[in-house]
């Protein structure tokens, strides 16, 4: 597992990380990447809310509202976070969680 430090762009209000794919927006890519395991704030790691909801959906529980709430929770974690925890040790880059 690797830790990708977040870079904040003040003018665009965007947060990016340097991924194997290139420089990607955390809000547009990491939130939906199957390699994202969570957000690091200081010494603590908070698991990705999308992964928790996705596990419920795979077991057959439809939860569209849960996915929307998970996305909002992820955005709040990113706002206060320092880095993204990524399990892409093979260097594959961004891969959609929902394919």
Image (cartoon, rainbow, N blue to C red):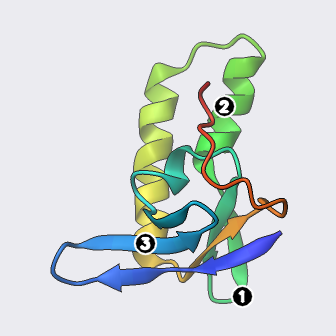
Q: Nearer the viewer, mark 3 or mark 1?
A: 3
| SS at circle 3 | strand
The image quadrant where one finds the C terminus is top right
Q: CA distance from mark 3 to mark 1?
A: 20 Å
Question: In what element is the residue under mark 1?
Answer: loop
Residue 56 place in picture, x, y as percent: 71, 25
Task: Say left or right for 31 vs 34.
Answer: left
Q: Nearer the viewer, mark 2 or mark 3?
A: 3
Q: CA distance from mark 2 to mark 1?
A: 26 Å
Q: Left or right of 45: which side holds 18?
A: left
Q: Is residue 81 above or below residue 59?
A: below
Q: In the picture, which quadrant includes the N terminus? A: bottom right
Residue at the extreme left: 11
Q: Nearer the viewer, residue 36 or 81?
A: 36
The residue where tag 2 is placed is: 54
- The residue sitting at 35% across, 82% down in the picture is 8
Q: Residues within 10 Å of mark 3 (few under 14, many from 20)?
A: many
Q: What residue do we see at 63% from left, 89% from top?
A: 42
**Residue topped by disc 1:** 43
The disc label shown at residue 16, or none: 3
Indicate which disc, 2 or 1, sits on the residue closer to the N terminus: 1
Q: CA distance from mark 2 to mark 3?
A: 23 Å
From the top left corner, tell me how far across and down residue 77 is, in percent: 49, 66
Residue 47 vs 83, above or below: the answer is above
Task: Give the image quarter of residue 18.
Answer: bottom right
Say what secondary structure mark 2 lies in.
helix
Q: Earlier in the sequence, mark 2 or mark 3?
A: 3
Question: Circle 2: is it few (<14), some (14-19), or many (20+) Cα within 10 Å?
Answer: some
């Amino acid at each position: 597992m690797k830790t990708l430090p977040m870079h904040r762009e003040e003018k665009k209000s965007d947060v990016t990380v340097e991924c194997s794919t290139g420089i990607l927006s955390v809000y547009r890519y990491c939130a939906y990447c199957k390699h994202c395991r969570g957000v690091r704030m200081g010494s603590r790691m908070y698991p990705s809310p999308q992964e928790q909801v996705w596990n419920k959906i795979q077991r057959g529980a439809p939860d569209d509202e849960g996915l929307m709430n998970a996305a909002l929770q992820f955005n709040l974690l990113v706002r206060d976070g320092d880095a993204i925890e990524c399990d892409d040790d093979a260097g594959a880059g961004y891969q959609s969680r929902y394919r």
